[in-house]
Image (cartoon, rainbow, N blue to C red):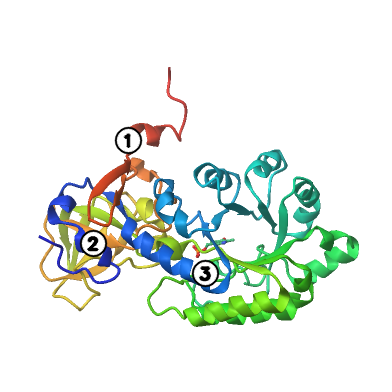
Amino acid sequence: MRLADTRPPFAGLANLSWEALASLPTPCYLLDEGQLRRNGELLLGVQQRTGCKILLAQKAFSNFNVYPVLAPYLAGTEASGLYESRLGKEELPEKENHVFCAAYRADEFAELLQYADHIVFNSPSQLAKFGPAAKAAGKSVGLRLNPECSTQEGHAIYDPCAPGSRLGTTRAQWDAAVQADPALPELLDGLHFHTLCEQDADALALTLAAVEAKFGGLLPRMKWLNFGGGHHITRPGYRLATLEQCITETQKKYGVQVYLEPGEAWALNAGYLVTTVLDTLQNGETSLAILDMSAACHTPDVIEMPYRPPLLDAGDPGEKPYLIRLGGPTCLAGDVVGDYSFASPLTEGQRLIFGDMAIYTTCKNNTFNGMPLPPIWAMDENGTCRELVKFGYSDFKMRLGRAAD
Ligand SMILES: *Cc1c(COP(=O)(O)O)cnc(C)c1O
């Protein structure tokens, strides 16, 4: 017997049997290898048609056990610092290894040089401080730009172009730095910008025009230009033609190699969080269910971003007759996933499946309230599930102190 509603983002569940689902422990992250492969094929197509290179931003998705699934499609990895760069080097040693960090540490930089091929600096002062050592080690050196072009509404914490931003170098900051140190530009092999978040290609086109207007004079001397992440390339309806036009025109005009480093796009809709209803309650008008997963611990972006994750066989409020507020077992009053409507009331022991749970979840989870870290499983194209890793009490305790011998 197959699951009923397997439209996107649940299309990958078409081959998962009720028996296989019932055998999973809960809560449990389930990575969907078929969906990862479909995303990979799409991103490979962009690379083949345009000649650009697409990296995996590991901060969004770093489940290295399934890196071999993505490897055929990846040009390399992108890291936010030393550990992710090391992870990329250990798990995908044949691939390019890029790193961007808002500020590198002097006591880590020599080690970082062992892993990274491309090192992107956030500021002229970091470039001046570490650039010469990076060049001497044969690395490709870049600077992150701030094109001062905000294209997103709503998510201010995801806008690196907001006034007073600490991310990227503005034209005014660059001009002042070059005036003080005219040799600075000679350190640069490439430029980088990252200003988008879950956006379509029209926002990229706008941003690219701002980059050209502000920094176009620097581009002809560069070997590469990195368009950053935030490109929702694998979302149905994304305007691929616009993206590919941005890439090919930029490469032709300036003679640069274009890089993209999305995180989300690689693993979009490629994972689920399976959870069990532990209790149901009624408080006045409000029907509630306590799940064995926690929004605060296991899907922190639901609260931070915030967003509403898709839930299999459930609707928005008003769509179906039974409206139920879903929350976690922690002490946090706001540990609520959201209000969902169902065809029938939820019952204790019932399983629910949240969708699009591969990105910004396993890499962000925590053990607040002593909540266990959910095990991570993978599902192959036939719907066969296997455990990748499980966690226990020691994973909670070891982060708080050293156990007595
Ligand atoms: C977050 C980030 C990415 C990846 O962003 P997605 O939204 O996951 O595509 C890429 N590059 C940099 C510098 C980032 O900070």
At 53% across and 76% down in the image, what residue appears? 152
* Residue 151 appears in view: no
Question: Which three-letter amino acid code belongs to the residue tagged 2?
Answer: Leu
Question: Which three-letter amino acid code belongs to the residue tagged 1?
Answer: Gly
Question: Counting other residues with Cα less than 10 Å from the Cα at mark 2, is it few (<14), some (14-19), or many (20 or more)?
Answer: many
Question: Counting other residues with Cα less than 10 Å from the Cα at mark 1, is it few (<14), some (14-19), or many (20 or more)?
Answer: few
Residue 203 in picture, x, y percent from top left: 55, 79
Question: Counting other residues with Cα less than 10 Å from the Cα at mark 3, is it few (<14), some (14-19), or many (20 or more)?
Answer: few
Q: Nearer the viewer, residue 333 or 143?
A: 143
Mark 3 = which residue?
A: 48
Q: Image quadrant for the C terminus?
A: top left
User: Is 69 placed above or below 191 here?
Assistant: above
Mark 2 = which residue?
A: 13
Q: Which label sits on residue 392?
A: 1
User: Is 378 placed above or below 177 here?
Assistant: above
Q: How far apart are the alpha carbons under marks 3 and 1?
A: 43 Å
User: Is 362 placed above or below 270 here?
Assistant: above
